[in-house]
Structures are given as C-alpha cells and as structure tokens.
C-alpha cells in the first residue's frame, strides 16, 4: 500500500557530492555495471500523511503536492530540507506541476471567483507571490511545465467550451490550437519555448505534438492510434507514451520527429528527460507489477535495483530528472 509516502532519490546527496559520484558511475558503466543512487525522503506538510514529488530544478528544489491537515492536497516547494505549503487561491486544493532554475513554480488551484462557484485556474508562484494566469476565455485552466524564462504551459477551456493547450508568455496566454481535432493540452516546455503535449487529430485521436516557431507538428505513434508527449529537453527531444499496433502502450523518445520505442512491458510511460537525454518514467509489466525506470545509454533500469536493498523503500514512480541526474518520484516507506 502506498501510504502516501514520497521521496526524492538522486546520485549521492545532490550538488557538491554529485560530481564525485558521477565520476564513479562513469567508471562503473565502463565495466558494464549499473549506476547507483542514494535515497532521501521529502517528508510531509504539517498534519499530512502523503506527498507526491512532480518536478525538480537544477538546484535540487522540488515541487509537487502533499496532503494537508485539512485533508486536501496543497502544492509544495521543497528547498533546503524543508517543505513549504504554497497555499491555494480561495479554494481547498492546489497542485504544483513545474519549477524552473529561478525557483518559480507553475501550479493550479481551486479558485473561487464567486460564492459557491469553484474552478481550477493556473498560477505562477514567484518570490512569495501567487499570480493567477487566467484562461483562454473559459472558466478553468490547468498548468503543466515552466521554463527558465518563466513561460508556462498547460491547458485552458475556451469561451466555446473547448479545452486547448496554452503557452503563457510575456503576461499573456496564447492558444496553441490542435492537430485538426477539438482539443489539446500542453505538458512540457523547454528553454527555447518549444512545447509538447497531446492534441486531437481530425480523426478524433490524441497524438503527441512538438510546437515550435508557431507550428504544431504531429509526432505520430508507435503503430497504434494515440500518443501523449510529457516532457521536452533543450534539443527538442520529446518523451511520453504511445500506442502499439499490437495493443498496449510503450514509453517513447522522439528525436528529430522520429519516435523510438523504449519498451515498458504492457504499458510504459516516460515522464521526464534532461538535456543529456536521460529519461525517467514507469513501466507496467502486468496487472500487478510495475516499476519506475531510468533509461540511459540504450538501457532501461528498474530504479529499485539502483538503490540500497537495505533502504526499506519500494519505489513506484519516477516523474522528473534534472541536469545532475537527480530524480524525483514517490514510493512506499515502511517506517
């Protein structure tokens, strides 16, 4: 049972110690040995019993959501060993979805524009201030990733009732459109302003896309009908999940518009990628078995095999990886 525990795991205790461990990992890789990771738990908000880590920046700051004493989830920022509650916008719940290297946080929260009317709206948390990013004319918006320029992506309902991907830049929310269908959403944005997510085609199926220079490119599938892009690095490489011709879904890595099958059992989903091309995600091998993975140098590793067997943890999902190779995710801690 998950019991709401979340942890952060990285190559040796982050920052100063990371360089030495990277060197050791490189030497081990030469001998065909798997990389090794140390593990650290993030803890909880006061009165809470669970937390989920979603994103990490290059300074090791982590964001996600955690249960509060009120029983609802609140967005958090984990920095310098402490978890900070980012609050809400008048409603009961909030969720952080991304963080950049300046510590700006992309999130969304229940918002109460009038008594008795609750919606979710995207916001940008910066220097202790919570800025509502608004919508594309509809009542709700939800954030995805954020880049180092403070550009935020996500999706919003339009005045026509459609759900469209957006890029928030220079104080305005821009509609990214679709691939010919009725809806879309954006999940990740890199420092060049390229965006990925999924959009409906004219045939009614969702396909992963790469949005660049004002154009949305269909990244296709692995032979099935649908795909979703979750993250993008500075090279424009996109990771996500895509349908197979034989059924099921596999994690993918798309480079230059060419989609590579990374595997993942019956259902694989790659959720994070760094600028070095390291990929993290989850592989579901059966109805009762799954594991979080790290994919690097052509090999997919079960992260449970890369931590000390004496840790007591069972890792269940990996959600993001930073430039140093530090990974965030969640799992079960028996203590």
Image (tube, rainbow, N blue to C red):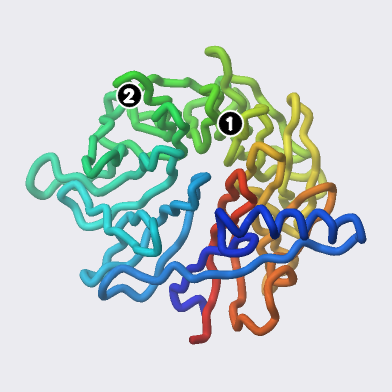
Q: Is residue 187 left or right of residue 263?
A: left
Q: Is residue 269 left or right of residue 178?
A: right
Q: Is residue 185 left or right of residue 11?
A: left
Label 1, label 2: how many angstroms apart (C-alpha)? 18 Å
Which residue is under mark 2?
A: 160
Q: Earlier in the sequence, mark 1 or mark 2?
A: 2
- In the rendered image, residue 214, in percent from the top left (x then y), is placed at 53, 13
Mark 2 lies on a secondary structure that is: loop
Judge whether 160 appears above or below 284 on screen: above
Question: Closest to the observer: 127 or 271?
Answer: 127
Asked whether the viewer can see residue 175, the reply is yes
Residue at image coords 72%, 54%:
22
Within-10-Å neighbours for mark 2: few <14, some 14–19, many 20+: few
Residue 204 - label: 1
- In the rendered image, residue 105, in percent from the top left (x then y), is placed at 36, 42
Q: Locate residue 232: give its quadrant.
A: top right
Judge whether 202 appears above or below 185 on screen: above
Check whether the beta carbons of the residues at disc 1 and disc 2 lie within 8 A of each other. no
Judge whether 186 appears above or below 76 on screen: above
């Amino acid at each position: 049972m998950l019991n709401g525990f979340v942890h952060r795991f990285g190559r040796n205790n982050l920052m100063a110690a990371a360089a030495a461990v990277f060197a050791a990992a490189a030497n081990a890789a030469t001998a065909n040995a798997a990389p090794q990771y140390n593990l650290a738990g993030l803890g909880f908000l006061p009165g809470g019993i669970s937390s989920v880590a979603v994103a990490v920046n290059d300074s090791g700051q982590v964001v996600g959501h955690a249960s509060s004493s009120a029983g609802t989830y609140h967005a958090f920022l984990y920095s310098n060993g402490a978890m900070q509650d980012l609050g809400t916008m008048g409603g009961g719940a909030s969720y952080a979805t991304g963080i950049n290297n300046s510590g700006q946080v992309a999130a969304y929260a229940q918002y109460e524009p009038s008594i008795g009317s609750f919606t979710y709206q995207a916001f940008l948390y910066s220097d202790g201030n919570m800025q509502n990013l608004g919508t594309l004319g509809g009542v709700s918006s939800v954030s995805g990733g954020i880049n180092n320029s403070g550009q935020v992506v996500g999706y919003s309902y339009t005045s026509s009732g459609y759900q469209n991907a957006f890029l928030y830049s220079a104080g305005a929310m821009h509609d990214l459109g679709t691939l010919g269908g009725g809806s879309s959403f954006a999940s990740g944005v890199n420092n060049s302003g390229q965006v990925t997510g999924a959009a409906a085609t004219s045939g009614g199926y969702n396909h992963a896309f790469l949005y660049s220079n004002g154009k949305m490119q269909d990244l296709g599938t692995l032979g099935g009908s649908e795909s979703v892009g979750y993250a993008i690095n500075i090279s424009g490489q996109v990771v996500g999940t895509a349908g197979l011709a034989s059924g099921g879904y596999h994690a993918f890595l798309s480079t230059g518009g060419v989609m590579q099958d990374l595997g993942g059992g019956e259902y694989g989903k790659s959720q994070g990628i760094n600028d070095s091309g390291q990929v993290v995600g989850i592989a579901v091998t059966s109805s009762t078995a799954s594991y979080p993975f790290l994919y690097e140098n052509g090999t997919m590793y079960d992260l449970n095999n890369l931590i000390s067997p004496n840790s007591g943890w069972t890792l269940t999902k990996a959600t993001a990886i930073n430039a140093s190779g530090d990974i965030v995710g969640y799992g079960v801690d028996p203590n």
